[in-house]
Image (cartoon, helix red, strand yellow):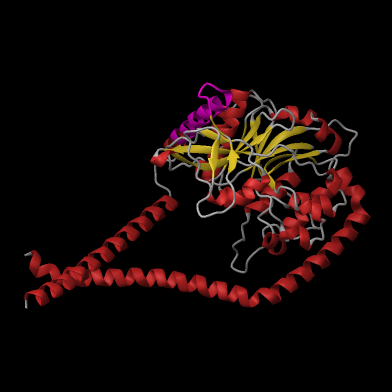
């Protein structure tokens, strides 16, 4: 019976395989065509975009020179008592989950009393239910700010440019910067939804660097050149420093209203800015430069550490996030989750770091980061990339003590994520989202394609073996 159906199975498998190949080659061809088109238009677009940017820059300089006192007054001035608070730009289900986790730790474990505002963009995010935050956060309650309902400054380019079909272009970096621009606080601690405080950030407002210069940023692990800096004519010294991790920072809007204007200017000219920089993270230093305040930009001199999650396979661990340190004593100030360390509604696993790579140097990052797969059985670790002639560099990996505060914060974060998922699922009726359904269908099709290819290969191999076997017999 099976033998009679073998030709039919073969034909069906062949058709499915051809369809899978058509899908893959179509996608490759489309990407290739887009790349070719981009390369062909690069020279003309680059020069045109740069000329437009320089022209808009001159107009902005004239506007700020003529109306800067109005901007200073609008942002509050220095005479009144300054308001302080935490701002978290977040949109979408997973970002709201991460924001809930971080605020839960901030309120229940750290005991921070600063007011918190979660900023999002209206209909594009569809944030419908805020009661979950109010029910689980101690006073003061968390407020929500729909940025799409605010008046937009007319002297800046569009934030979400309209398309002819009525849809809108979405870019989270620009929305994040506008959230800072429009935040209700004079002095702001901005934290990405995946950046969790490990101590009360309110004390950083009293740090001498912030009191003197009105801002505080933390370094990224990258210390390579930023093309945007050279395009703006920034000095060589600026280009040799660490890049900026904008996942968390402090900013005094009353001290630097001009920097704020240039910051929004840079990020709304994203066709130029994001071509030469990765998102918003290095536009803050560039905005200080454009405002003539490059000497007031504060980058914490404590290099970041790297959070590692233990993997049982070969006792190795993978980098899962950045750990930022206090500018004075080097204690852990923030945990910035990246990659798979972010919480997700569709994943019940915890997100705790088991080990830390302690403050690797800029030179070490530049040479060894991409080859780094640390083993967690020894401290310190001598790590030498395979196939490289450079001498091994010593890096220190420490295991996080399960009884330490940092471990307690992470356990609390996992509990908060579980709480949010359970209440979110009950409120949503336990339905699978459209994105999750699309993902399941995509994975199923990929598995079917792989099985069909393997089936055809097995038939081909069997035919080849049978032919050689028959020749040997004859």
**Would residue 158 be seen by someone viewing this image from the given angle?**
no
Q: Position of residue 330 (x, y in %)?
A: 69, 30
Residue 189, image x, y percentages: 72, 36
* The one of 57 and 46 positioned closer to us in this rendering: 46
Relative horizontal placement of residue 255, taking residue 243 as reference (left or right): right
- Residue at the (40%, 41%) spot, across then down: 314
| The one of 454 and 141 positioned closer to us in this rendering | 454
Q: Residue at x 63, y 56 (%)?
A: 171
Q: Is residue 450 above or below residue 406?
A: below
Q: Is residue 269 above or below residue 42?
A: above
- Find residue 467 and report its image quarter: bottom left
Rendered position, 446 above or below 126: below
**Left or right: 6 with respect to 394?**
left
> Which quadrant of the figure has residue 393?
top right
Where residue 234 appears, as percent x and y from the top left, is 81, 57
**Which portion, as a residue range, is magenta?**
400-422
Residue 291 is inside the magenta segment: no
């Amino acid at each position: 019976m099976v033998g009679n159906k073998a030709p039919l199975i073969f034909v069906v498998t062949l058709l499915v395989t051809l369809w899978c190949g058509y899908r893959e080659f179509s996608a490759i061809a489309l990407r290739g065509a887009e790349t070719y088109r981009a390369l062909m238009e690069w020279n003309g677009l680059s020069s045109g975009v740069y000329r437009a940017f320089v022209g808009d820059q001159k107009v902005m300089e004239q506007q700020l020179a003529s109306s800067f006192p109005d901007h200073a007054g609008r942002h509050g001035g220095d005479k009144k008592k300054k308001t302080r608070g935490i701002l978290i730009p977040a949109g979408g289900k997973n970002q709201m989950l991460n924001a809930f986790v971080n605020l839960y730790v901030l309120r229940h474990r750290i005991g921070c009393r600063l007011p918190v505002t979660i900023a999002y963009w209206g209909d594009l995010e569809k944030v419908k239910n805020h009661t979950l935050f109010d029910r689980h956060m101690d006073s003061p309650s968390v407020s929500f700010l729909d940025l799409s309902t605010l008046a937009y400054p007319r002297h800046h380019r569009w934030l979400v440019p309209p398309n002819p079909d009525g849809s809108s272009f979405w870019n989270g970096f620009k929305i994040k910067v506008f959230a800072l621009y429009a935040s209700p606080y004079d002095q702001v601690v901005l934290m990405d939804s995946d950046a969790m405080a490990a101590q009360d950030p309110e004390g950083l407002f009293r740090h001498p660097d912030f009191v003197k210069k009105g801002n505080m940023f933390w370094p990224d692990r990258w210390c390579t050149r930023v093309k945007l800096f050279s395009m703006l004519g920034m000095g060589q010294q600026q280009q040799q420093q660490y890049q900026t991790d904008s996942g968390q920072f402090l900013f005094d809007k009353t001290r630097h209203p001009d920097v704020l204007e240039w910051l929004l200017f840079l990020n709304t000219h994203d066709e130029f800015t994001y071509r030469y920089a990765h998102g918003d993270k290095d536009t803050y230093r560039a905005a200080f430069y454009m405002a003539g305040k490059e000497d007031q930009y504060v980058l914490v001199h404590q290099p970041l550490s790297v959070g590692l999650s233990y993997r049982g396979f070969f006792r190795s661990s993978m980098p899962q996030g950045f750990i930022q340190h206090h500018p004075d004593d080097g204690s852990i100030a923030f945990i910035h989750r990246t990659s798979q360390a972010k919480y997700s509604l569709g994943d019940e696993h915890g997100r705790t770091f088991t080990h830390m790579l302690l403050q690797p140097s800029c030179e070490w990052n530049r040479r060894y980061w991409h080859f780094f797969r640390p083993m967690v059985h020894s401290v310190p670790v001598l790590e030498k990339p395979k196939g490289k002639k450079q001498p091994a560099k010593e890096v220190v990996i420490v295991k996080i003590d399960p009884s330490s505060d940092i471990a307690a914060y992470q356990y609390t974060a996992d509990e908060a994520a579980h709480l949010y998922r359970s209440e979110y699922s009950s409120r949503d009726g336990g339905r699978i989202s459209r994105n999750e359904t699309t993902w399941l269908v995509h994975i199923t099709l990929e598995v079917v394609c792989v099985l069909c290819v393997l089936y055809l290969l097995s038939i081909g191999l069997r035919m080849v073996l049978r032919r050689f076997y028959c020749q040997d017999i004859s």
